[in-house]
Amino acid sequence: MNDPVYVVRCPDYDHAEEKMEMLFSMLGGMSRFVKPEEKIVLKVNLLQPAAPDQAVTTHPRIVAAVARLVKEAGAFPIIADSPGAGYKYTSKTLDTLYRKTGMIDAAKVSGAELNFDTTVKPVSFPAGKLIRHFEVIGPVATADGVLGVCKLKTHTLMSITGAVKNNFGVIPGLSKPGYHAKLHDKAQFADMLLDLAEYVSPRLSIMDAVIGMEGDGPGVAGVSRPVGLLLGSVNPLALDIVASEIVGLRREQNPLLLAAAKRGATPSDIAQVEVVGADAQAIRVPGYRLPATVDELGIRQHLSWWQKPMGPFIKDWLSQAVRVVEKKCVGCGICRESCPAGAIAMTLGKRKRAVIDDKLCIRCYCCHELCPEGAVELRRSLMHKVLGVGV
């Protein structure tokens, strides 16, 4: 067995502090992960300025509970993240982000510092299988250590986002589209995430699964779903495997686990993970709604050999397209800024709105993920319509 995943039941956020103490007791205490005087980044998930009850971001009660334990161990917790593609990594953006997501309150009650260092550092990572150079946000590059404090959410591109995907936030906002442009194949993007997680090498990953997100996450288009769990592991991949079990995501539907297995990383299957504190089957949430983009029937795998000769047709046939709901669009331009393919333009005139060129669209779903108004929707593919899937 590889590094175990520890699980504690937490019915609501009013119990966050008590249950976090229980989780760290099982893990061996915070002093196992941090030393006095160290600067420890709490790498939270702050995808976009969204209220805590929307389940888009790590809940502030969870962040405060972890930060307080770091302080009690004599270290200095720093709450940090870079929001999603489309958002500039500036002090103004961070201030809005912290206020909307409740991080200002989390810092006040726990004594943590909020990061306003907007420098970006180039780093070398020779051990990378796919990517050997990254540009990361300053606080992560200079910290003594990192603790990942992620959120259990579905994800239209990667099926699920958790401990490994959380590390993508160390890439500054407007640099993220470049990775999507170069790595718009899910397998390649997953490979990059595994390299990045290895570079960041969080000492511990904690997952906020008290209230998760189902449906077409990870942004405001997703739907909150009570799960009632806190999870922790020194191995972010192991944590994500258990998270996949919780939501009923099969291994063949999870690009990250397929990429891990291909490169020989372990664990890559639930059979290789020891779950402590609960039975893996008992914590599974029945009827958890996966994104419409998940290949439920395994069609893409069987037709992959058609991709080259019939690329455009297969693209429309198998994948979910995106469309703008005009009455919801406020013309903020975040979708345009986040688009790695330059497929989105804004109309001219008094009332601006976004227009998507489907021929240029690479199906990365960044626009859908980051639209603060939920104005970018998924349109069922031809195959889904024929088979009646995703209605």
Image (spheres, grey):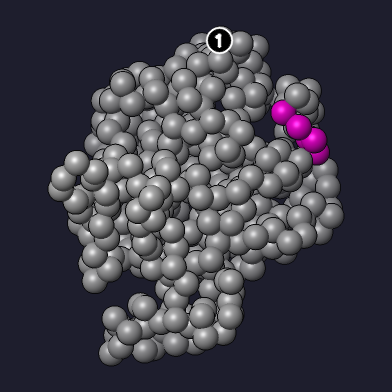
Residue in front for this viewpoint, 25 or 365: 365
- Tell me residue 55's x, y (percent): 59, 39
Helix, strand or loop status at disc 1: helix
What residue is rendered at 44% in x and 87% in y?
Answer: 303
Q: Which residue is mark 1?
A: 108
The span picked out in magenta is 9-13
What residue is rendered at 35% in x and 77% in y?
Answer: 315
- Tell me residue 245's x, y (percent): 70, 59
Left or right, residue 108 beside residue 170: right
Mark 1 crowd level (few <14, some 14–19, many ≥20, 10 Å Cα): few
Q: Quadrant of residue 289?
A: bottom right
* Residue 59 drawn in magenta: no
Is 295 located above or below residue 323 in the figure? below
Is 17 located above or below residue 326 in the figure? above
Is 170 located above or below residue 99 in the figure? below
- Does residue 210 show up? yes
